[in-house]
């Protein structure tokens, strides 16, 4: 369903389970960044009322997820910690060449956002299936379904604005690139690392 071409290294879950404070902290900041992305899209492209409406709703949902993760941290007497650089996301953001075509830039941003949500969904699925902590397994199961919906939302908008055939070609190129860089990830205590 997600189209990912390289699954997460199974050892990532073992690392994650040993460093849950770091995973939860990084996860919280990922949710905040997702909300910021949604806000940026609606501010940058106000001429598309459907996009504005969906991104406003998404920003609210992502911030509610931030609050949920923060609550889990507090309940476990863990620290939110400082926001960390997300090298994975930065590399994805650099994949598409710069263009003066405003609509194409939108399609690129939507595709990158879709891929980030897809990878997060895959990682949440692993956590929901393999963590020994039953509460966290349930927590990540609920969030996994939400991430899958966000992935579809971004991909559907990209196809709408970029045309199905052209967008699917760009999507496959991005998936190939992501599979290549994922060979370097799966060894850090972060959602995408």
Image (tube, rainbow, N blue to C red):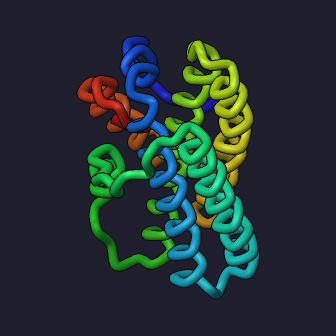
Position of 190 with respect to 78 (left or right) is left
Answer with the quarter of the image where residue 124 lies.
top right
Residue at 71% across, 44% down = 146
Answer with the quarter of the image where residue 61 lies.
bottom right
Q: Quadrant of the N terminus?
A: top right
Relative to residue 155, is residue 181 depicted above or below? above
What is the number of callouts on the image? 0
Q: What is the x, y in percent for residue 7?
A: 45, 20
Which residue of the protein is positioned furthest toward the left in this rendering?
184
Q: Is residue 77 visible?
A: yes
Which residue of the protein is positioned furthest toward the bottom in this rendering?
47
Answer with the quarter of the image where residue 153 lies.
bottom right
Q: Quadrant of the C terminus?
A: top left
Position of 116 with respect to 82 (left or right) is right
Q: Is residue 159 visible?
A: no
Which residue of the protein is positioned furthest toward the front in this rendering?
77
Residue at 51% across, 63% down = 107
Residue at 45% across, 60% down = 108
Q: What is the x, y in percent for residue 97?
A: 28, 61
Front position in the image: 13 or 4 = 13
Residue at 33% across, 25% down = 186
Relative to residue 55, is residue 110 depicted above or below? above
Q: What is the x, y in percent for residue 84?
A: 31, 52
């Amino acid at each position: 369903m997600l189209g990912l071409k390289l699954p997460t290294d199974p050892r990532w879950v073992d690392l994650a389970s040993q460093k849950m404070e770091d995973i939860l902290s990084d996860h919280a900041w990922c949710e905040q960044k997702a909300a910021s992305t949604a806000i940026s899209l609606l501010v940058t492209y106000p001429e598309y009322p459907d996009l504005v409406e969906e991104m406003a709703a998404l920003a609210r949902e992502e911030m509610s997820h931030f609050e949920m993760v923060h609550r889990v941290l507090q309940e476990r007497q863990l620290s939110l910690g400082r926001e960390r650089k997300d090298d994975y996301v930065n590399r994805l953001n650099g994949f598409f060449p710069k263009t003066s075509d405003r609509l194409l830039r939108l399609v690129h941003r939507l595709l990158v956002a879709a891929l980030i949500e897809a990878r997060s969904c895959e990682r949440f699925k692993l956590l929901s299936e393999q963590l020994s902590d039953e509460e966290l397994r349930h927590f990540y199961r609920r969030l996994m379904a939400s991430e899958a919906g966000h992935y579809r939302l971004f991909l559907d908008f990209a196809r709408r604005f970029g045309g199905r055939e052209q967008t699917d070609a760009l999507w496959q190129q991005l998936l190939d690139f992501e599979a290549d860089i994922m060979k370097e990830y799966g060894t850090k205590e972060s959602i995408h690392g």
